[in-house]
Image (cartoon, rainbow, N blue to C red):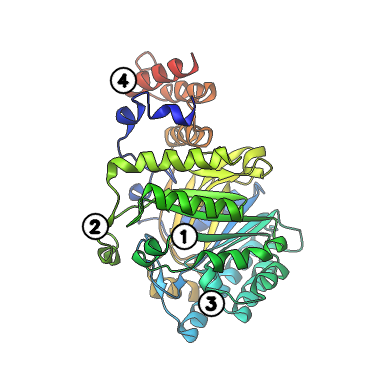
Amino acid sequence: MKISDIKNTGLLAQFNEPGHWFTSFPSLNHWKEDFTHKEYELAFREFIKTQVPLHLYVHIPFCAKLCHYCICNIVITNDRDKIQFFLDHLLKEIDNLKAFYEKEGITPNIQEVHFGGGTPSHLDREQFESLCDRVRYLVGDEPLREVSMEIDPRTIKEGDLAFYAAEGVTRISFGIQDFDPGVQKAINREQPFEMVRDIMKERHHFRGVNFDLLYGLPLQTHETIKRTLEQVKELSPDRITLLKYCHAPEVRRHMKLINVSDLPSPDELPIMFLDIAQSLTDAGYVWVGLDHFCKSTDSLATGPLVRTFNGFKPGPVKDMIGLGPTSTAAFGRFYFQNHYDLNCYYHAVNEGKFPILRGYELTRDDELRREAIFSLLCARDLSASARLLLRNLAKVFDNKDTEPEHLKIAQLNITRKIA
C-alpha cells in the first residue's frame, strides 16, 4: 500500500490510537530497583565471556540551554568546573570498567561508540579529547565500526568538526527539530537554517550525518513543515529520525512554558507524519523501521535492522552497555540503568562500583515477546517471520492447545496481511 493511499482507506481512523513506544520489552516501569552493582557484575561477567560485540553508549548530561520540548534527563549549566567535576567521575567509571575486564582476563569486544546526552558538544576540546583518550584506553587498538556523536549546532565553533573527526568520530547527529523561526522561538531552540547550512559544509569529515526532526511542536502547520522539509532536503542528511513531540508537563515541568493552544490538533498529527513520510520518500529516502529515513546507499537501508535504546540501527551489533548517569544497558537477557541522581552516581563510581539504579532479567517468555515486537518494529510490517515468532510465543503457555485470545487475533491479522 502506498503512503498516499492510507488516508483514503479509513486505516487512519481505525488505527489512530495511542500505544506503547517500545525501546525495550518489558518497558522501564517494570524494571526492579533491587538490581544493583552485584547483579550487574554477575550478569556482565557471564556475558562478556561470550565475546559478543558491544555498542558503548556514553552519556553527557549537560546542556547549555533548556529546550522546552525536551523529555531527556539533563542538567542545564555553563559552569566549566561543574562539568569538569562530572567528567572526572566519568573517566573514573571508564577506569572501573577497564579494571573489571582486566580482572576477568578478557579483552573488551566494543565495536561501536556513541556519545549522547544532553550535549556532548558542550564539552570543550580539552575535555572531549580526554574523554576520547580514555575510551580508546578501554576499547584497545582494534578499529571501531563506528563512533557517533550528538551535536548542538549552537555549541560549536569553527574547526570543531575537524577536531571531532581527528578524535575518531565517524558520524554526527544534529537535533534540528524544525527550521521555522516561529517554531524555534516557541521551543527555545533558535538555530537558523543558515547556521546549519554553514556547518554542513564540513560534512566531508564524516561518513554520515543524521538529522532529528520533531512534529507536533507549537506553531507547526502543514505549511511550516513543508518549508522545513525543503530546507532539510537541500542539506541532504544521510539519515533522518522523525519523532512525535510528547507534551508531558506532569513529567517535565519546563513543558509548561509551551502554550498548549499553540500545539497542533491531535487529529492532525498522523496526517503530518504521513505527509512528511511521503515528502521524504518522494525525495529518494528509504523509510526504515517506524520513524527513520535514510538514503538508499546508507547502511540502515542495505543491512539488517536492529532496535536498541538509541533507536533503529544497522546490525550486527545489538547488545549495549552504558556509561554516565541515566544510561542504559541491554545485553543478553538483562537490562540495567545507571543512577539519575548525580550524587548517587558519583558515590558509586568513587567506591569502584557500577552505578546501577535498577535492572531486569528477562524470562524466556519475555525474550520471545521482545523478539516478536522488535521484528515488527524493524520490518514495519507483519511479516511471515513475525507470524512464526508469535506462534512460537504461544508455545510457552502451559496449555499448548489453547492460545490466548490476543495471540489468535494477532495471528489472524498477520495472515490477512500476508494474504
Pointer 4: what residue?
405
The residues bearing labels 3 and 1 have C-alpha atoms spaced at a distance of: 32 Å
Q: Residue at x 38, y 45 (%)?
A: 27
Pointer 1: what residue?
179
Looking at the rendered image, the disc whose residue lies closer to the viewer, 2 or 3, is: 2
Q: What's the residue type where badge 4 is placed?
A: Glu
The label on residue 87 is 3
Q: Is residue 325 above or below residue 12?
A: below
- Provide the secondary structure element on which disc 2 rests: helix
Q: What's the residue type where badge 1 is placed?
A: Phe
Give residue 57's quadrant in the image: bottom right
The residues bearing labels 2 and 4 have C-alpha atoms spaced at a distance of: 39 Å
Q: Is disc 1 in contact with disc 2, using a CB cutoff of under 8 Å?
A: no
Pointer 2: what residue?
260
Mark 2 or mark 3: whose residue is earlier in sequence: 3
The residues bearing labels 2 and 3 have C-alpha atoms spaced at a distance of: 37 Å
- Provide the secondary structure element on which disc 3 rests: helix
Mark 3 or mark 1: whose residue is earlier in sequence: 3
Q: Residue at x 34, y 43 (%)?
A: 269
